[in-house]
Image: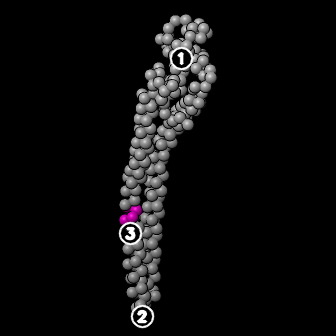
Amino acid sequence: MKWYADSSGRRTFQIVVDVFLLCFLAVSVWLGKRVDDGISTLRGPADGLTSAGGSFRDNMSGAADTVGGIPLVGDGLKSPFEALSGSGQRLADVGTSVASTVDTVARTVGIVVAVVPIVVALLVWAFFRIRFVRRATAASRLVGSEGSMELFALRALTRQPLRRLAPLGPNLARRFRDGDPVVVRQLAALELATCGVSVDGDETSPRVPRLA
């Protein structure tokens, strides 16, 4: 597998893109964590409600136990305090439920904020890089085989934009048909440069758009 181009300029660009991608992934994760932490601060009132409800429940439960020990009238006096204790428990349950909801929302939003840009960036990077790897690997396997230069030269004539063929001089097709070795090599180098491969390790191949 050929992951990077032979030409130093395009290879440097690809490395820079990879480093930028890693930095982007790290920033996305950090941003998602910051969003999670920011939303989680909203659970403060819910925690206060849980604490207040629990404290009220415990106080009323203690009061119920105290008055329940009074002879004759204890059972009658105990009931209101037990009811208040139940109200405190319900208040604590509401606080716990709200806190749990805040945690869920914070976690979900944080994950979305982190994952969505990461997925988009990886898909874009993978599209261009996998396309490059497939073309560069296939081309590098053909380089050096019999007739490979003529094959790449022919592909250049049929696939390369005219603005890249023009600098190679006039009568390009005729010179190619006549088997001019200089033209064949120039055309092959042009096509190979598009694939990210140089001719015989030559890094002075024609410059092409820097797609990863």
Q: Where is residue 174 in the image (x, y as percent from the top left)?
A: 59, 7
Between disc 2 and disc 3, the foreground one is 3
**Residue of label 3:** 51
Numbered mark located on residue 85 in the image:
none
**Does residue 156 appear anywhere in the picture?**
no
Q: Where is residue 70 in the image (x, y as percent from the top left)?
A: 40, 91
Residue type at the position of mark 3: Ser
Q: In this view, does 139 lie above or below 62?
A: above
**Prevailing secondary structure class for the magenta stretch in the rendered image:** helix
Numbered mark located on residue 71 in the image:
2
Residue type at the position of mark 1: Arg
Label located before the other in sequence (1 or 3): 3
Between disc 2 and disc 1, the foreground one is 1
Q: What stretch is highlighted in magenta?
A: 45-49
- Cα–Cα gap, marks 2 and 1: 112 Å
**Residue of label 1:** 185
The secondary structure type at the circle numbered 3 is helix
- Cα–Cα gap, marks 1 and 3: 80 Å
Residue type at the position of mark 2: Pro
